[in-house]
């Protein structure tokens, strides 16, 4: 067994999250910046969810999955940023062992769920473009709900494995985590035992939850590209491509930093660099997703204008 007995050692009961700076003035500036980013992200994604719920024309599989993505994003950013905001103004940015366990689980589960949801959204685009006449028959509401629930179940299952094997390690020495939240590899680097086997298990999870979904998305878009090229009219090709452009953009924004951080050999990791890159998919990607979908999506714009117009009439 790789797990040593927990006797006769002093165990860590809390962790100190180092964040980005120890300078009080810098932390106050960062507090304002991240507060604005957080509120903007919640407002943008909340607006997408509200528009989809209120507008009957948006009650389609594509927007059902988009609504799920926005809800995921709001929860995803909420697992890390509110606590970071508190720590930016606190004298002692600590988190309990149990709190760290829960934060790691939720962050991993939501991130892995999003990885799978992007595959589901690619499948939705594949059916819409390659089999348009059977779109609503194939993607019934029952199947949509099962796909969304399945993405969540897979995400939480693998996140539970990752969190359990990480937090069951013996932590008997330093408790300073060089990150702004309890990120798995950063916490694991403090363990007072060899973690080579755990890192290998994490690599397997990374292949299953990053490489495999990316491959499926890539395969879907090869078929979609072939179908678009068979469309004779230029306008038809443009319309078909525009329905996929938003999805391709957010997939690129999400998967690029994740692949860079989690699919590299552990020996090449720079904790300071990873901490900053994590912001790309945990904060900035969440902020940009509503902008990408609203700027490139006519239906979302029309729904927004209808809500604004209805509100103005009521006034």
Image (spheres, rainbow, N blue to C red):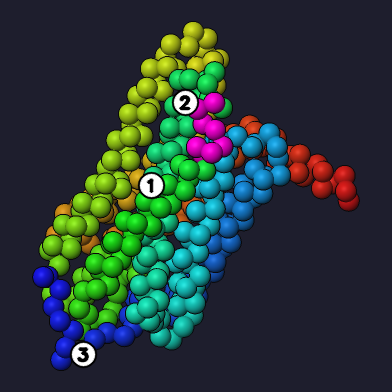
Q: Pick the residue in front: 51 or 209.
A: 209
Mark 1 Cα-neighbour bin, 10 Å: few <14, some 14–19, many ≥20: many
Q: Nearer the viewer, residue 3 or 81?
A: 3
248 with respect to 187 (left or right): right
* Kind of element beneath mark 2: helix
The span shown in magenta is 137-144
Q: Which mark is residue 127?
A: 2
Whichever of labels 1 and 2 marks the residue nearer the N terminus, that label is 1
User: Residue 27's spot in the image, x, y percent?
Assistant: 45, 75
Residue 10's disc is 3
- Residue 254 placed where, x, y %? 39, 47
Please tell me which of labels 2 and 3 falls first in the chain.
3
Q: Secondary structure at mark 1?
A: helix
- Of 300 and 100, nearer the camera is 100
Residue denoted by label 1: 115
Was residue 292 drawn as part of the magenta stretch in this picture?
A: no
Picture coordinates of residue 15, whole percent (x, y): 33, 80
Q: Is residue 44 above or below residue 222?
A: below
First in sequence: mark 3 or mark 1? 3
Residue at horizontal 52%, vertical 12%?
A: 234
Q: Who's the residue at 61% across and 47% down the image?
A: 48
> Helix, strand, or loop for circle 3?
loop
């Amino acid at each position: 067994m790789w797990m040593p007995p927990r006797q006769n050692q002093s165990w860590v009961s809390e962790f100190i999250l180092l964040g980005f700076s120890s300078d009080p003035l810098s932390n106050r500036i960062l507090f304002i910046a991240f507060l604005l980013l957080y509120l903007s992200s919640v407002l943008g994604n909340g607006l997408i969810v509200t528009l989809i719920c209120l507008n009957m024309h948006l009650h389609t599989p594509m927007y059902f999955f988009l609504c799920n993505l926005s809800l995921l994003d709001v929860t995803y950013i909420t697992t890390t940023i509110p606590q970071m905001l508190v720590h930016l103004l606190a004298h002692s940015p600590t988190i309990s062992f149990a709190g760290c366990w829960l934060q790691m689980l939720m962050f991993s589960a939501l991130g892995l769920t999003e990885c799978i949801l992007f595959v589901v959204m690619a499948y939705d685009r594949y059916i819409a473009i390659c089999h348009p006449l059977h779109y609503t028959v194939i993607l019934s509401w029952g199947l949509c709900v099962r796909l969304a629930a399945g993405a969540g179940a897979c995400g939480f299952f693998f996140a539970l494995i990752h969190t359990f094997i990480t937090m069951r390690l013996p932590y008997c020495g330093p408790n300073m985590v060089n990150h702004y939240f309890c990120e798995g590899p950063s916490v694991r680097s403090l363990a007072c035992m060899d973690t080579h086997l755990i890192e290998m298990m994490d690599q397997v999870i990374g292949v299953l939850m990053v490489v495999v979904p990316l491959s499926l998305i890539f395969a879907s878009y090869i078929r979609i590209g072939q179908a678009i090229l068979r469309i004779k009219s230029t306008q038809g090709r443009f319309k078909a491509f525009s329905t996929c452009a938003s999805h391709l953009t957010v997939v690129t924004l999400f998967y690029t930093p994740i692949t860079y951080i989690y699919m590299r050999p552990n020996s090449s990791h720079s904790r300071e660099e990873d901490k900053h890159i994590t912001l790309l998919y945990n904060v900035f990607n969440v902020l940009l997703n509503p902008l990408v979908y609203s700027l490139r999506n006519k239906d979302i714009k029309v729904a927004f204008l209808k809500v604004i117009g209805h509100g103005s009439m009521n006034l």
